[in-house]
Image (cartoon, rainbow, N blue to C red):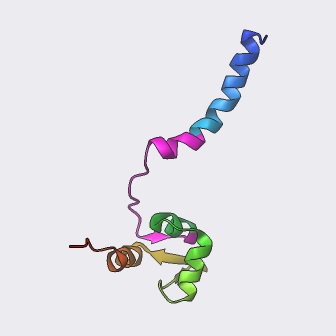
Amino acid sequence: MFDEIFIQKLAEAVAPKLAHLLLPVLKPNPLPTQEWFTRTQAAHYIGTSVEALRHMIREGMFPVYSANGRDRLRRSDMDRFWLSNRQRPKD
């Protein structure tokens, strides 16, 4: 049906794309160590979309700092958000 060369070339073409999709699922990312996040990084850190994060910023839930004309969010503000919004175990 298919010759061996075709299958090898197909595997070489598909493997990097599959690895890109599967590695984040199979190997969780370690916690980031940087103190400042872009909006995309901050949204990923708290487990939401960038659009949801923008809404939270507009609502005043997170302060935004400007560094060299670029908006940044502080990791400690993200951590504070999680600590104040975590669910307490029910008795």
Q: Residue at x 52, y 76 (%)?
A: 72
Q: Is residue 19 magenta?
A: no
Q: On the image, which quarter does residue 50 sit in?
A: bottom right
User: Going by the picture, which residue comes out furthest to the front?
Assistant: 91
Where residue 15 appears, as percent x and y from the top left, is 63, 30
- Location of the C terminus by quadrant is bottom left
User: Going by the picture, which residue comes out furthest to the right?
Assistant: 1
- Location of the N terminus by quadrant is top right
Where residue 85 appears, as percent x and y from the top left, is 37, 78
Relative side of 27 to 48, left or right: left
Instruction: From the viewer's side, name the closer residue of 85 and 37.
Output: 85
Instruction: From the viewer's side, name the closer residue of 15 and 32.
Output: 15
Relative side of 35 to 20, left or right: left
Q: Residue at x 32, y 76 (%)?
A: 83
Q: Is residue 21 magenta?
A: yes
Q: Residue at x 41, y 72 (%)?
A: 75
16 in relation to 41, above or below:
above
Q: Is residue 68 visible?
A: no
Q: Is residue 74 visible?
A: yes
Give the magenta part as a residue range. 20-39
Q: Residue at x 46, y 41 (%)?
A: 26
53 in relation to 47, above or below:
below
Where residue 27 appears, as percent x and y from the top left, is 44, 43
